[in-house]
Image (spheres, coloured by chain):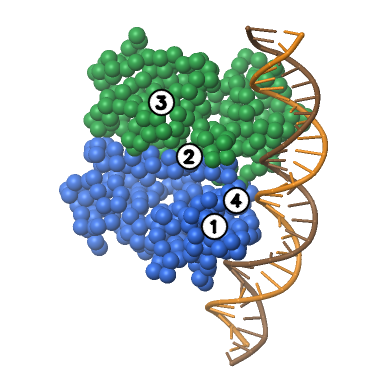
Chain colours: A green, B blue, C orange, D brown
DNA sequence: CGTCTAGTTGAGAACCGTCAAGCACCGTGG
DNA sequence: CCACGGTGCTTGACGGTTCTCAACTAGACG
């Protein structure tokens, strides 16, 4: 099994603030796991009792609404941590985590993380920073959900994925989402999302290669009203 | 000017985790202020450079959307802290804070708080907990905004205010919000909010005393679909 | 070759935003 | 004292957006 102190992934998250000794201690307690595309890592109400560090792959965080639809709240990618929020409040999970492709995860038990949170103030300040960043993003999403049309939200989602998760060599978005996933990010019916996407295509803003989406005119997308 | 170490307000927020010495130090640096109803405490883009402790009164945190409407993201009441998020990321304010009635605030400069965040791990863990709680609430709001109707959201908003901020002796909600505020919490047009409210009234779920709202049938409100 | 899932399109209904008009209340200035 | 204007509240009407139901297509996979 790999060693945390040598793992390059940690530079992308708060674990970078831990000392070598702390990383060695954590490394001896962690467990690695492989998750297959579509598998659920944890669901709403689960006691997680630890934190996952995403070594590879992508997953979605979603919550089931009373109308039966899954609302995607955040996309988590390689280098991110998963489950910090529940760990800190000591509550069960508020969201479900589902792998969007095959993933490699390291699980660090709760006690190890809490110990460092209470003893390494730089580490806890870093976790605080990440949480503050997530909160800002969540506030911005609330405003968008409340005030913008499906068309605007979908355009912004495509741009967000493009800017934050990058593209393949052929220019398509590297994160492959189903039409249903797009609908669940934007908070609309699958048919509505599909209709808007084909409208974007007709207007020359995007193109599709297979089921993948490629941005043709990013300025046009940004100007969508 | 009052002394932090004797102030009973702090028991409601993370400041309770500071030692007496730390509170004395902070108390000597803080400034008190009175804010009148309707006044803006800080707006989007401001450098706050500190944290406000709400000694009395209520304010709203909102963000201006590109369509010109203000989306209310959170209501902050007596005992809460204001501005922690921006302080931690070091960014300018993401939201605007506006007093909903006359307020009494204490302002604590950034350096004092950061010092304690880095030196008192119980304090920073408490701040972390509050932030984690805010993040959970924000995620839940996203789901509601995306998946529920204006009618459902308004019913839940009334219940939320009732449960979290209490009622006056006559049973009306103690937080007095304008119809526009309700619309801006729910994320809809003022006329739409008004229409739903009068529908609730017609159905006997709520009553109005002056401009104040009183819940008549809370179970009915919870069952609104 | 059937079956399953994801994607797609159409049509009608429900929901919501906008414009417009009118009402109630309040403070100001004549 | 009253007329006046301002602001917030309320209701109606209409049009655009979005949801839902239904039918159909394309591809995957045994």
C-alpha gap between disc 1 and disc 2: 20 Å
Question: Which one is closest to the eye, mark 3 or mark 2?
Answer: 2
Q: Helix, strand, or loop for circle 1? A: helix
Q: Is residue B217 found left or right of D10 in the rendered image?
A: left
* Chain under callout 2: B
Circles 1 and 4, Cβ within 8 Å, touching? The answer is no
Given residues B33 and A13, the one toward you in this image is: A13
Circles 3 and 2, Cβ within 8 Å, touching? The answer is no
Which residue is the site of mark 4? B150
Question: Which one is closest to the eye, mark 4 or mark 3?
Answer: 4
Circles 2 and 4, Cβ within 8 Å, touching? The answer is no
Which residue is the site of mark 2? B139
Are the numbered discs 1 and 2 placed on the same chain, yes or no? yes
Which residue is the site of mark 1? B182
Residue at point 20%, 57% (across, down): B6
Residue at point 54%, 60% (across, down): B205
């Amino acid at each position: 099994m790999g060693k945390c102190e040598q793992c390059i992934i940690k530079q992308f998250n708060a674990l970078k603030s831990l000392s070598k000794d702390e990383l060695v201690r954590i490394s001896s307690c962690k467990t690695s796991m492989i998750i297959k595309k579509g598998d659920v890592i944890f669901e709403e109400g689960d006691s997680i009792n630890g934190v996952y560090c995403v070594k590879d792959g992508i997953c979605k965080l979603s919550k089931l609404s009373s109308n039966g639809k899954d609302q995607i709240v955040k996309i988590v990618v390689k280098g991110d941590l998963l489950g910090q929020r529940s760990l800190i409040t000591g509550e069960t999970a508020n969201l479900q985590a589902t792998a969007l492709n095959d993933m490699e995860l390291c699980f660090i038990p709760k006690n190890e993380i809490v110990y460092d949170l209470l003893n390494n103030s730089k580490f806890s300040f870093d976790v605080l920073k990440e949480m503050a960043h997530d909160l800002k993003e969540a506030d911005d999403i609330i405003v968008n959900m409340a005030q913008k049309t499906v068309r605007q939200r979908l355009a912004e989602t495509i741009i967000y994925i493009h800017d934050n998760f990058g593209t393949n060599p052929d220019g398509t978005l590297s994160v492959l989402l189903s039409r249903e996933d797009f609908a669940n990010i934007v908070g609309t019916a699958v048919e509505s999302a599909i209709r808007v996407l084909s409208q974007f295509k007709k207007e020359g803003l995007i193109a599709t290669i297979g089921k993948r989406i490629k941005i043709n005119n990013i300025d046009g997308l940004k100007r969508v009203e």
